[in-house]
Image (cartoon, rainbow, N blue to C red):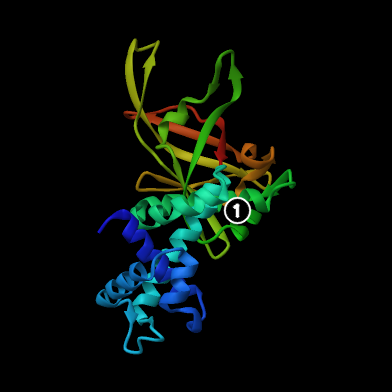
């Protein structure tokens, strides 16, 4: 089956999902979708063969339970894709046309990424015009799920030309934001870090062993197990700058980090962790 035929089949399936039963017939479909009646009849036959439509009453075909489930599956994909494309600047007409192909052929993994991106867009719209808000407010606004966020760890006191902390390389990028029932956590995965030691005159390898985060006027020990550092989202202070596609939302907090090189524990240092939505 050609891509054009598959798109037409999807459009027919969604027509049955979204349209009153009295308008679910060949004549109405032919007029609405601007296709010949024989093309519509062919698609109805295929949908019946696939178990999506019941045509026992040829004058009033209807979706089967399976057809309802598949229709809802593709409708969610279609709506999500249109929203994403329009936000990225595609005009509505082209977004609608292309969305059928995305809904049909994108993998579930790709759609999960688009869904997460769309959620970030919704967050930006929600907090537009609000310059400052808390991590708790964000957790109560965002849908339950797991999101990947870019982040950067900067020095507390930057040196000339050196603002990024060495600890920025001590964690996998991106990090994970997990939200459930209005509570969020930021999860950083610790990895080995190598750096040149001017004292040893060689590369040395270390790893983050202790992380503390600043909240309510004091530092708290972060949960640290299986190389994953867990920090409550409510510890972050968030800011919103710009409008439209130029809008940026970021959240920051102070940290204290300590690394170990072999059996040697390095001095604790301060840094600023910034999340970027």
Residue 18 location (% of width, % of height): 50, 73
Image quadrant of residue 198? top left
Decide: is 108 above or below 219. Answer: below
> Number of numbered discs present?
1
Judged left or right of residue 240, residue 118 is left
Q: Is residue 210 visible?
A: yes
In the image, what residue occupies the spot 46% across and 63% down? 34
Given the current orientation, which residue lies at the most extreme bottom position?
57
Residue 211 location (% of width, % of height): 49, 40
Residue 237 location (% of width, % of height): 66, 44
Judged left or right of residue 97, residue 140 is right
Residue 158 location (% of width, % of height): 60, 20
Image quadrant of residue 217? top right
According to the picture, the residue beneath numbered tag 1 turns out to be 122
In the image, what residue occupies the spot 61% across and 40% down? 245
The residue lying toward the viewer, choosing from 164 and 42, is 42
User: Could you classify mark 1 by the number of other residues whose Cα lies within 10 Å: few (under 14), some (14-19), or many (20 or more)?
Assistant: some
């Amino acid at each position: 089956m050609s891509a054009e035929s598959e798109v037409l089949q999807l459009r027919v399936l969604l027509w049955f999902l979204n349209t009153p039963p009295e308008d679910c017939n060949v004549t109405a479909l032919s007029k609405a979708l601007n296709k010949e009646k024989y093309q519509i009849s062919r698609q109805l036959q295929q949908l019946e063969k696939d178990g999506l439509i019941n045509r026992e009453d040829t004058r009033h075909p209807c979706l089967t339970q399976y057809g309802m489930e598949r229709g809802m599956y593709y409708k969610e994909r279609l709506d999500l894709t249109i929203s994403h494309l329009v936000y990225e600047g595609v005009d509505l007409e082209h977004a609608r046309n292309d969305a059928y192909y995305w809904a049909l052929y994108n993998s579930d993994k790709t759609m999960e990424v688009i869904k997460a991106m769309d959620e970030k867009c919704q967050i930006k719209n929600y907090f537009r015009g609000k310059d400052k808000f808390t991590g708790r407010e964000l957790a109560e606004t965002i849908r339950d799920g797991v999101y990947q966020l870019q982040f950067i760890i900067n020095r507390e006191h930057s040196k000339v030309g050196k603002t990024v902390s060495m600890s920025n390389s001590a964690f996998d990028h991106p990090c994970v934001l997990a939200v459930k029932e209005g509570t969020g956590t930021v999860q950083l995965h610790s990895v080995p870090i190598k750096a040149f030691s001017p004292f040893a005159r060689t590369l040395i390898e270390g790893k983050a062993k202790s992380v503390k985060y600043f909240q309510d006027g004091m530092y708290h020990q972060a949960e640290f197990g299986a190389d994953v550092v867990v920090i409550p989202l409510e510890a972050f202070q968030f800011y919103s700058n710009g409008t439209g596609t130029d809008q940026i939302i970021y959240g920051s907090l102070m940290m204290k980090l300590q690394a170990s090189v072999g059996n040697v524990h390095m001095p604790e240092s301060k840094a600023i962790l910034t999340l970027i939505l």
